[in-house]
Image (spheres, rainbow, N blue to C red):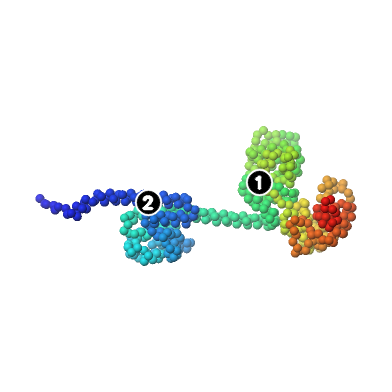
Amino acid sequence: MTNKSAPTPAQLAVHSTAPMTAAHDLHDEAESEDIELLVIHEAARLLGHATTPDVAIHGILRLMSQMVGLNRGRVVLPDSAGHMSIQYAYGLTALERQRGQYAPGEGVTGRVMRTGQTAVIQNIDDEPIYLTRAVDRSTLPQETVSFLAVPILHDNVPMGVLGTHRLRKRKRAFSRDVTLLRVLATFIAQILRMNTLIEEKTARLADENRALKQALEDHTEGAHGILGDSPALKQALRQALHVAPTQATVLLTGESGTGKERFARMVHITSNRQDGPFIAINCAAIPENLLESELFGHEKGSFTGAVAMKKGVVELASGGTLFLDEIGDLAFDLQSKLLHVLEKQLIKRVGGIKDVAVDVRIIAATHKNLQKAINEGRFRIDLFYRLNVFPIHLPPLRERSGDVRSLARHFLQLASQEFDRNTMFGQGVLERLEHYNWPGNIRQLENVVKRAVLVAQGGQISVEDIVLILRHEARIGEHLEAGTSLSTAAPPLPEPTPMPYEARLPPAHTPQPANLRGYNWVREDEAQELLDALKQARGNKTRAAGMLGMSARQFRYRMVKLGLVDGGE
């Protein structure tokens, strides 16, 4: 029988303490798990609430250092050429971050980036490829220091590296630290990806903003037939381009001849309905008894002459845009039917019994005061509010400072091509055009330039040509204001000899006060000229103003300033 030796005191000590050590290890493990969960919870909170990548990533690196002893954490990211540098860090000085530069594949960090594999360096002093570049070894604890590096992945492709130091002798297993680092690297990947998406969206919005500004500049240079560079026009263009991509109903207001149909076409062309039809109709140009059929169509046999079903312009414009000019002249009983279209996108043809669905955007225009028409019971207030979703006021030409010149040159080029002429403006003509009041706005300016091209002698439009044409324009305005027919008007007065206008213009270098917009400078030697014109016009101030190429208001202003009439008259 073999005798076994008795256990030594040392062995007894080991055996007696073994249960206590196991219990202590279990306690340490549970505590480590609690700390890891806390780190992950706080990192997730940073992911959801941090305003910038700097705040979120710096916070995660701080948690790693303060709660689990993963010190001097750094996030290394590549540039477009693959060269890597420390972009975020905790526990590193500015100089250490600056030194953290790596060529593609260089060192432990470069290898992790290239391979996508985790690196666990048990002892940085024994690892040849560990460069000790960012942090000098003399600044680290004089004991065994380890280095851990995990890839930051997006769609399983490395987009950076998360690296950190730790003391080798710590009780926590390397595997636990690596697992925690991989979780945190996933959070950091999400932060970086979100930041990239925000930067891309910001850049895209900036590009769109630049494109919108360029489009606006293009529009002011003649796109869609709208020319001009005045602030008033640019404001209207900005509003039109802003509302164009939406489905909102637009109401264009302004005087006759300000280009409402061109604006309506621009809104259509720059909207998502640009491939659909654009149909324009003038509500004042069609007899009231025909307008309902023109707008909504009719069924066969609905009235005498209705030999076939006919679609109206509302139905024909479905999928596109319908421009209703002079909406203020729409008959009251038709206003309710138009309101039905705006509210429900349904029409009923004349003589029909069922509704027809349409998909049409309405752009309306008027030069009348619709609010006054509402007060007088001539326009429905509910229709007004449906039309007035997005109002745009088109400025009259007299308020578009500087645009007359560019428009006149444009119309000159078009008229010269139309009439096969090679015509140019003579000295002082543009200045004369610029100082006219233009009650008919752009349409009137275009007609004046066309007429000037036809009457010009020797290929040059003179100031005298323009004065004569504007004098005739003023007479037309006089007859219209008086409500008389041109055919029954009094015989024209003898035409006075055209008087050079340059003498009445202000010096080119003298600015015109803003409160005198539309007026010329008044000179003392003008008095006799005004009186002579008034005498030839037999006391009719409007006619005298027309002889001088002025508006009645400009003529009266001069008479008052020169003391020829009482200002209170």
Asked if residue 385 shows in the view, the reply is: yes
Q: At 87% from the left edge and 59% from the top edge, which residue is drawn?
A: 528
Q: In the depicted view, which residue is nearer to us: 203 or 413?
A: 203
Q: Which amino acid, by three-letter code, is at mark 2?
A: Glu
Q: How crowded is mark 1: few (under 14 residues within 10 Å), some or many (20 or more)?
A: some
Q: At 67% from the left edge and 47% from the top edge, which residue is drawn?
A: 391
Q: At 10% from the left edge and 50% from the top edge, which residue is drawn?
A: 1
Answer above or below: position of 404 versus 362. Answer: below
Q: Is residue 188 left or right of residue 402?
A: left
Disc 1, disc 2: CB below 8 Å?
Answer: no
**Which label sits in the foreground, 1 or 2?**
2
Q: In the depicted view, which residue is nearer to us: 484 or 218?
A: 484
- Label 1's element? strand
Q: Is residue 506 left or right of residue 97?
A: right
Q: Name the residue under label 2.
A: 36
- Label 2's element? helix
Answer above or below: position of 387 versus 510. Answer: above
Q: At 76% from the left edge and 58% from the top edge, which residue is drawn?
A: 434
Lower sequence index among marks 1 and 2: 2
Residue 189, percent from left and from top: 44, 54
Q: How crowded is mark 2: few (under 14 residues within 10 Å), some or many (20 or more)?
A: some
Q: In the depicted view, which residue is nearer to us: 402 or 258?
A: 402
Q: As drawn, which residue projects farthest toward the top?
A: 353
Residue 486, percent from left and from top: 85, 48
Q: Is residue 199 left or right of residue 299?
A: left
Q: Residue 48 carries which label?
A: none
Residue 454, percent from left and from top: 80, 57
Asked if residue 114 shows in the view, the reply is: no
Where on the picture, by quarter, is residue 168? bottom left
Q: Name the residue under label 1.
A: 390
Where on the picture, by quarter, is residue 388? top right
